[in-house]
């Protein structure tokens, strides 16, 4: 049986110089003894998998909300797909797969019900009230540092600094990185993201781009003809032998989506490998320092250390624009998202009108609250709901003769 120290020694031998070695972690918010058989990032991963917020991802949806059917991807299946893609990329780049997995499994913990429609609804409400806007990265950070209560000596999961930074500064076209100013001193150290956290960002963008195509085709909200406007899609179709004149069209869809992912991962690994040769990072601290400068100064002054080739980046952006136009703004999707926003806004207004309707554990009655504080409490409570719970709560509040 391997000990933690033996696993850490193995990391020294097999991981790249720029990888984040477990034994060099900045540490946790609260001091804990090391585990004899698991590294720090293995423990983080295990704590995330066993937390309540992770289990709730099963009933939180992506594009197609829960009342549309049970085929479509949920936050949980999406999270698993992101972790799988990220670990595959990380293994090829000789990175710390345990750190990758921990960040990947936690990156969507803070999402509210009804996908991006729910996030938009909460954000609009909070902005109109003059409160801190809703940011699901910050919400994810709050979950692992405050709301999960599993240990007697501290709130939260007491994760390592590298995992918390990866959660807070997660960034894609749908994810805005949280600011260290928003977390009220709960960071051990504000620093740049690890290489591993950046790989999770890329895996997330790969997962939702390609699997939204899958769900969109299945729903009929986007067609193969729509996608033939994309050079990337056409290349993938050619690689699987073209559009079949007859036979199993579902199989054709799966094969093209599979090829799309493979083409993008291969391109990313090749383009990133070329960049790494140029940067020649000697250790993970150099990576963190570079990414901190990147997050502070922006891409205009600092070149990103990872990424796709210029051709692939252009083709991906075009494919994404087709999804934006044809899928995300399809009239059926607009109906879903409008209904979802209406439900959450109505629930929020009822709670705000009389906060005593909130459960005691959510809003204790032994203290006074400002308006902003009440709004923060309501926002956090609604964000913690699953799609199913939000729908049930809406029925209890607005439909007559429902059991309360």
Image: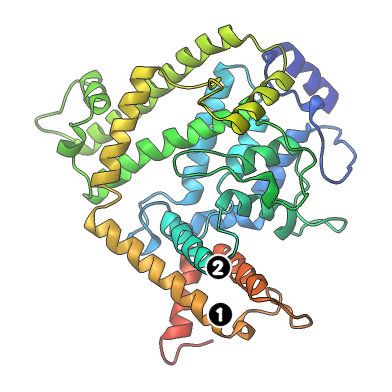
Left or right of 143 in this view: 332: left
Residue 99 seen from this side: yes
Q: Quadrant of the C terminus?
A: bottom right
Q: Of 290 and 399, which appears nearest the observer? A: 290
Left or right of 376 in this view: 148: right
Display colour scheme: rainbow
Residue 113 seen from this side: no
Q: In terms of image quadrants, where is residue 278?
A: top right
Residue lying at 59% horizontally and 42% vertically, measured from the top left: 105
Query: Where does label 1 land, which residue?
Result: 351
Residue lying at 73% horizontally and 34% vertically, measured from the top left: 41
The picture places residue 124, in percent across and down from the top left corner, at 47, 63
The picture places residue 182, in percent across and down from the top left corner, at 67, 51
Residue lying at 32% horizontally and 62% vertically, measured from the top left: 336
Q: In terms of image quadrants, where is residue 245?
A: top left
**Considering only vertical position in the picture, is 376 above or below 11?**
below
Q: Name the mark nearer the viewer: 1 or 2.
A: 1
Q: Of 180 and 277, which appears nearest the observer? A: 180
Proximity of marks 1 and 2: CB atoms separated by less than 8 Å:
yes
**Helix, strand or loop at disc 1?**
helix
**Helix, strand or loop at disc 2?**
helix
**Considering only vertical position in the picture, is 280 above or below 31?**
above
- Whole-angstrom CA distance, mark 1 to mark 2, is 10 Å
Query: Where does label 2 land, which residue?
Result: 382
């Amino acid at each position: 049986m391997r000990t933690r120290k033996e696993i850490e020694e193995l990391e020294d031998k097999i991981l790249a110089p720029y990888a984040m070695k477990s034994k060099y972690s900045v540490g946790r918010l609260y001091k804990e003894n090391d585990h004899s058989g698991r590294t720090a990032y293995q423990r983080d991963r295990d704590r995330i998998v066993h937390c309540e917020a992770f289990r709730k991802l099963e009933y939180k949806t992506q594009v197609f909300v829960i009342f549309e059917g049970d085929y479509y991807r949920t936050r949980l299946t999406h999270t698993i797909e992101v972790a799988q893609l990220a670990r595959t990329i990380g293994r090829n780049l000789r990175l710390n797969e345990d750190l990758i997995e921990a960040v990947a499994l936690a990156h969507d913990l803070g999402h509210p019900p009804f996908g991006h429609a729910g996030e938009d609804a909460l954000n609009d409400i909070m902005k109109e009230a003059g409160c801190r806007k809703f940011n699901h990265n910050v919400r994810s950070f709050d979950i692992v540092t405050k709301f999960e209560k599993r240990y007697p000596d501290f709130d939260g999961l007491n994760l390592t600094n590298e995992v918390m930074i990866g959660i807070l500064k997660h960034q894609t076209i749908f994810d805005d990185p949280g600011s260290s100013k928003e977390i009220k001193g709960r960071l051990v150290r504000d620093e740049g993201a690890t290489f591993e956290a950046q790989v999770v960002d890329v895996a997330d963008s790969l997962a939702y781009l390609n699997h939204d195509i899958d769900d969109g085709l299945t729903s009929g909200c986007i067609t193969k003809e729509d996608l033939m406007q994309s050079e990337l899609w056409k290349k993938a179709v050619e690689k699987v032998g073209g559009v079949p004149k007859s036979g199993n069209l579902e199989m054709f869809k799966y094969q093209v989506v599979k090829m799309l992912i493979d083409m993008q991962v291969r391109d990313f690994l090749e383009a990133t490998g070329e960049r790494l040769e140029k940067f020649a990072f000697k250790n993970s601290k150099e990576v963190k320092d570079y990414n901190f400068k990147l997050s502070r100064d922006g891409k205009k002054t600092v070149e990103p250390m990872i990424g796709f080739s210029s051709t692939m980046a252009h083709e991906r952006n075009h494919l994404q624009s087709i999804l934006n136009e044809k899928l995300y703004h399809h009239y059926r999707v607009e109906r879903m998202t409008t209904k979802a926003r209406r439900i959450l806004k109505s629930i929020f207004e009822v709670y705000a009108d009389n906060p005593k309707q909130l459960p005691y554990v959510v809003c204790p009655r032994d203290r006074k609250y400002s308006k902003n504080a009440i709004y923060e409490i309501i926002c956090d409570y609604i964000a913690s709901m699953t799609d199913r719970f939000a729908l049930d709560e809406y029925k209890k509040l607005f439909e007559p003769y429902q059991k309360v």
